[in-house]
Image: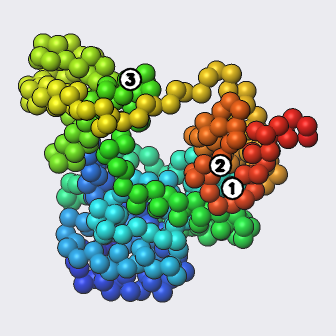
């Protein structure tokens, strides 16, 4: 049966369709966007799939996004997306809202042990037996008119996404379905949590090797880079390369010649922002000790690798019992945070990142293992 394609290019039709979509138990949702030389994604298309109908919303023409925002927040309508972190960013930029409840078909595939982190085309092939064309993923979605191939590609994505939900939902137990929605809610919560620019320096590789005074410089460099990337709407690396941050904080250059010798320092950065950066480094380096950040904890020692492997095995065993892809069980960062909470002698504390059903089913087993109970099992 052919896909019916409906274009939505005005506010009024969008409002009318959103009212109808809110009567559905679920809608499939996808976006096409461009993000080559910008910090923020630029929306080129929003697709809604309902049955064999694909609705293509043109974000270059729509002005009032409130009806779509209402649909996104309607708890009676499940929103179906695939590997949706960037789609969430696009929707948040357009509407100011995020979808809930959210069913991510990539997560559902993991819960059904079909595969972990499966691409959309592969999942459609595996579940629906359809081969999708791959040619339009990187085409220009801001051009007008869109090519027939682009329109067909976008429409198929939305409709097959709805078919995926119809195929996957009956295969999920009620528990697993609830867990997929729980993980979807966590994706939304993570998107809502604004990263505090004051804490970005902690993510810089080898930050733990810097003194507290050097960390003060690194913190200010990271704050400035983030702010400028957003203000100029360019990727962070266009402001300052990631690998330049640490040596700048370590060596604290005081002239343009020294700054130019920093690893990965682009000549454009020297021309545009060189003097400003020297002044920023000087100001940050002169901050009094009570304004320095705390020292960063060292990475776990090599001896901890065996303990991490043992903890990961608890998740893998539970994944086998539940027939869930093992990668979905316990994330490496969560296990590292748990181990760091009391290494080497304890007591250990479950990290906040271990939430919901994972905490209920595996939290105590992890603590027991670290307390030595696992050795005696």
Q: Is residue 51 visible?
A: no
Give the residue drawn at x 64%, y 61%: 356
Question: Which residue bears the numbered disc 3?
Answer: 210
For the residues labelled 1 and 2, the Cα–Cα distance comes to 8 Å
The local secondary structure at tag 1 comes to helix
Position of 20 compared to 373: left or right? left
Q: Residue at x 32, y 80 (%)?
A: 67
Q: Residue extending furthest right? A: 377
Q: Label 1 vs label 3: CA separation?
A: 34 Å
Q: Residues within 10 Å of mark 2 (few under 14, many from 20)?
A: some
Q: Is residue 306 left or right of residue 249?
A: right
- Towards the viewer: 89 or 309: 309
Sequence-earlier tag: 1 or 3: 3
Look at the picture and state if 377 lies above or below 191: above
Work out whether residue 359 or residue 342 is closer to the camera in this orientation and state it.
Answer: 342
Image marks 1 and 2: residues in contact by CB distance under 8 Å: yes
Q: Nearer the viewer, mark 1 or mark 3?
A: 3
Residue at the location (60% across, 48% down)? 351
> How far apart in space, not on screen, are marks 3 and 2 (Cα)?
28 Å
Residue denoted by label 2? 350
The reply to whether callout 3 and callout 2 are in contact (CB within 8 Å) is no
Q: Residues within 10 Å of mark 1 (few under 14, many from 20)?
A: some
Badge 3 or badge 2: first in the primary sequence: 3
Mark 3 Cα shell of 10 Å, populated few (<14), some (14-19), many (≥20) = some
Q: Nearer the viewer, mark 1 or mark 2?
A: 2
Pick the quarter of the image with the C terminus.
Answer: top right
| Helix, strand or loop at mark 2 | loop
Q: Which residue is mark 1?
A: 359
Q: Position of residue 20 (x, y in %)?
A: 41, 86
Where is residue 138 drawn, in percent x and y?
A: 34, 44
At which x and y percent is residue 206?
Answer: 43, 24
């Amino acid at each position: 049966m052919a896909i019916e394609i409906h274009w939505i290019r005005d506010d009024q039709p969008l409002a009318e369709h959103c009212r109808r979509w809110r009567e559905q138990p679920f809608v499939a949702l996808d976006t096409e966007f461009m993000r080559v030389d910008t910090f923020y994604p630029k929306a080129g298309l929003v697709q809604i799939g309902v049955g064999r109908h694909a609705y293509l919303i043109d974000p270059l023409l729509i002005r009032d996004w409130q009806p779509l925002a209402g649909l996104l927040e309607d708890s009676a309508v499940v929103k179906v997306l695939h590997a949706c972190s960037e789609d969430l960013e696009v929707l948040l930029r357009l509407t100011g809202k995020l979808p809930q409840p959210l069913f991510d078909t990539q997560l559902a595939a993991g819960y059904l042990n079909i595969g972990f982190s499966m691409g959309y085309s592969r999942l459609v092939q595996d579940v629906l037996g359809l081969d999708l064309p791959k040619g339009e993923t990187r085409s220009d979605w801001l051009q007008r008119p869109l090519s027939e191939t682009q329109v067909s590609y976008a429409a198929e994505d939305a409709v097959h996404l709805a078919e995926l939900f119809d195929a996957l939902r009956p295969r999920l137990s009620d528990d697993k379905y609830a867990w997929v929605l729980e993980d979807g809610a966590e994706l939304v919560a993570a998107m809502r949590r604004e990263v505090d620019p004051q804490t970005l320096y902690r993510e810089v590789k080898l930050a733990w090797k810097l003194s507290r005074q050097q960390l003060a410089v690194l913190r200010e460099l990271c704050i400035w880079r983030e702010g400028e990337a957003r203000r100029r709407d360019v990727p962070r690396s266009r402001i300052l390369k990631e690998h330049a941050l640490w040596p700048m904080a370590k060596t604290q250059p005081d002239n343009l010649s020294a700054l130019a010798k920093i690893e990965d320092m682009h000549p454009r950065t020297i021309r545009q922002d060189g003097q400003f950066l020297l002044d920023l480094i000087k100001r940050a380096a002169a901050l009094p000790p009570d304004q320095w950040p705390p020292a960063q904890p060292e990475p776990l020692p090599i001896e901890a690798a065996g303990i991490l492997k043992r903890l990961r095995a608890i998740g893998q065993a539970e994944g086998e019992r539940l027939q869930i892809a093992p990668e979905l069980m316990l994330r490496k960062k969560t296990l590292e945070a748990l181990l760091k909470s009391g290494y080497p002698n304890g007591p250990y504390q479950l990290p906040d990142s271990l939430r919901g059903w994972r905490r209920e089913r595996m939290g105590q087993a992890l603590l027991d293992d670290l307390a030595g109970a696992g050795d005696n099992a």
